[in-house]
């Protein structure tokens, strides 16, 4: 269902998207994310990072919000999107920057 949701986001953006991070096993997540450790959003299979410049970041945020996504992280060169919530142990709604 998360992949279907991201297909809808991609369709709304209207161009191919470059995924820089999708599912991570807990061990790898602990290596690359000191803030979330071994059980961050990417370990659920319901989180994705997409390479994006300023223009694409805007389009992705706009499309994600239209799809009801309420957790978005914004970095200089990517957007993090996940559909996790309070019941999953992740505060929502949230928008953060890296």
Image: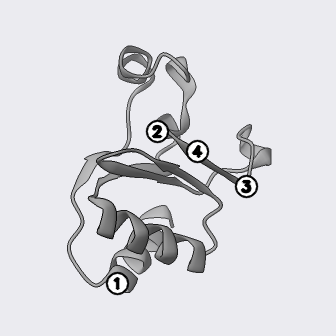
On the image, numbered disc 2 is attached to which residue?
A: 42
Which of marks 3 and 2 precedes in the sequence? 2
On the image, numbered disc 1 is attached to which residue?
A: 11
Above or below for 1 versus 62? above
**Residue lying farthest to the right in this orientation:** 87
Badge nearest the viewer, 4 or 1: 4
Which of marks 1 and 2 precedes in the sequence? 1
Give me the C-alpha separation between circle 4 and circle 1.
Answer: 24 Å
Q: Is residue 21 left or right of residue 61?
A: left
Give me the C-alpha separation between circle 3 and circle 1.
Answer: 23 Å
Q: Which residue is nearer to you in this view: 5 or 96? A: 96
Q: Is residue 89 left or right of residue 49?
A: right
Task: Identify the element where label 2 is drawn.
Answer: helix
Q: Quadrant of residue 6?
A: bottom left
Give me the C-alpha separation between circle 2 and circle 1.
Answer: 22 Å
Q: Residues within 10 Å of mark 3 (few under 14, many from 20)?
A: few
Give me the C-alpha separation between circle 3 and circle 4.
Answer: 10 Å
Q: Which residue is nearer to you in this view: 4 or 51? A: 51
Give me the C-alpha separation between circle 4 and circle 2.
Answer: 16 Å
Q: At which x and y percent is residue 94?
A: 68, 50
Q: Which residue is nearer to you in this view: 90 or 2? A: 90
Q: Is residue 24 left or right of residue 51?
A: right
Q: At which x and y percent is residue 88?
A: 72, 43
Residue name at image x 33 percent, y 50 percent: 78
Give me the C-alpha separation between circle 2 and circle 3.
Answer: 17 Å
Task: Identify the element where label 3 is drawn.
Answer: loop
Residue 93: mark: 3
């Amino acid at each position: 269902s998360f992949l279907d949701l991201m297909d809808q986001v991609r369709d709304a953006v209207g161009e191919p998207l470059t995924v820089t991070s999708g599912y991570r096993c807990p061990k790898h997540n602990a290596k690359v994310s000191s803030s979330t450790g071994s059980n961050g959003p990417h370990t659920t299979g319901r989180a994705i990072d997409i390479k994006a410049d300023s223009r694409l970041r805007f389009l992705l945020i706009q499309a994600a919000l239209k799809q009801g996504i309420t957790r978005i992280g914004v970095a200089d060169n990517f957007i993090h999107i996940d559909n996790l919530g309070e019941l999953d142990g992740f505060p929502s709604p949230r928008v953060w920057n890296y």
